Image (cartoon, rainbow, N blue to C red):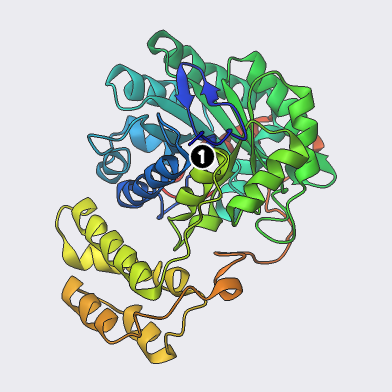
Amino acid sequence: MSLATPVLPALRIGRLTIESPVVLAPMAGITNRAFRRLCREYGSAGLEAGGASGASTLYVNEMVTSRALVERNERTMQLISHDPDESPRSVQLYSVDPVTAGQAARILVSEDRTDHIDLNFGCPVPKVTRKGGGAALPWKSELFASIVAAVVREAQPYAVPVTVKMRVGIDAEHVTYLDAARRAEAEGAAAVALHARTAAQAYSGTADWSAIARLKEAVGIPVLGNGDIFSAEDALRMVAETGCDGVVVGRGCLGRPWLFTDLAAAFAGSPARVQPTLREVTDTLRRHAAYLVDFHDGDELRGCRDIRKHIAWYLKGFPAGSQVRHQLALVDSLQALDDLIGGMDLDAPWPGEAAEGQRGRAGSPRVVALPDGWLRSRELNAEQQRLVAEAELDTSGG
């Protein structure tokens, strides 16, 4: 039997070759070692279904701040840990200061803690943008370029590629992505990923995929498209419409790690898709919970607390009563989880349309919280410099 024809060539990011051109978007509190393990297992299954080989997908860990990494914060060091068989290892770094960013990158590469560094300039969370960080930062073009340059300078001697994730801009009147991508390329970034929304949109409305197409025409490095990919068919359509070199998937895989089976198969040219029964979904949920317990060094209560936020995503569209859902959202042990799962109608088939579509937060458009006078100039003044220094928080999203 002849093998299917891949939809895209392998994604090349520096020295890394990603056979399936898919990236798991870093999501705060989600893409820890446990969830990445689950996604890798499903991605590998999709490659086998499609007859492909090699590294299945680039699975990026949840973002860490450069300051916390330099200070070797205990939680941060746990977040950048990888499974022994995880390859390539990928870390997303958030920074507002070139010096600290460079120091953090030096730790990652000189201590052999990663094979790839992604820089976060896409976070729309108000507590970050109001101090000039995240999606607000590319507006200050020289600061943006200096951070990228500092990280690339440290990573290059170790052949660790650096990529940049960004948004279209702050709002429709303050668009930054084309200028920022060109600057990132000039400073040595190996690829750029665009979430095709502004910070003002956050996760609301519809992503403007035409911006991805324009970005593809503007730079010579690989362009990855992000926004509104909730199925393999969405990913194929994005590639067809924009010409992007690969896709970044975030909310679409929440409670649905088998999306990586579908994506790997689809990009390998295979029609294989996963439509699990409730039994198969709860088996995955249970495995995810066990992996979280392992991630938390055997602390069952912490692992079970961590799985709670995933429950509604896993059960989306399935006939599980409100009482069971409520009890699952309070689960405090693996045995309690097993007992609740055992009382469900596990033979329920995949619910089809009810389980498809958007997952995770959407919200409404908003006015972006910014430092006073931020939009008056593309350069930093002294007061803004002080505020930006405070923007490197322990937590954010993006």
On screen, residue 281 above or below 77: below
Q: Residue furthest right?
A: 173
Q: Which residue is mark 1?
A: 23
Side of 379 where 383 appears, left or right: left
Give the structural element (helix, strand or loop) at label 1.
strand
Q: How many marks?
A: 1
Q: Residue furthest front?
A: 1
Q: Specify whether residue 114 is in view.
A: yes
Give x and y (percent) for residue 179.
76, 26
Give x and y (percent) for residue 249.
55, 47
On screen, residue 376 above or below 262: above
Side of 367 where 324 appears, left or right: left
Quadrant of residue 245 within the rendered picture = top right
The residue that appears at 59% across and 51% down in the rendered structure is 232
In-front residue for pair 103/391: 103
Q: Specify whether residue 374 is in view.
A: no
Give x and y (percent) for residue 92.
45, 36
User: Callout 1: few (<14), some (14-19), or many (20+) C-alpha neighbours within 10 Å?
Assistant: many
Residue type, label 1: Val
The residue that appears at 60% across and 32% down in the rendered structure is 385
Give x and y (percent) for residue 293.
21, 59
Q: Residue furthest top?
A: 157
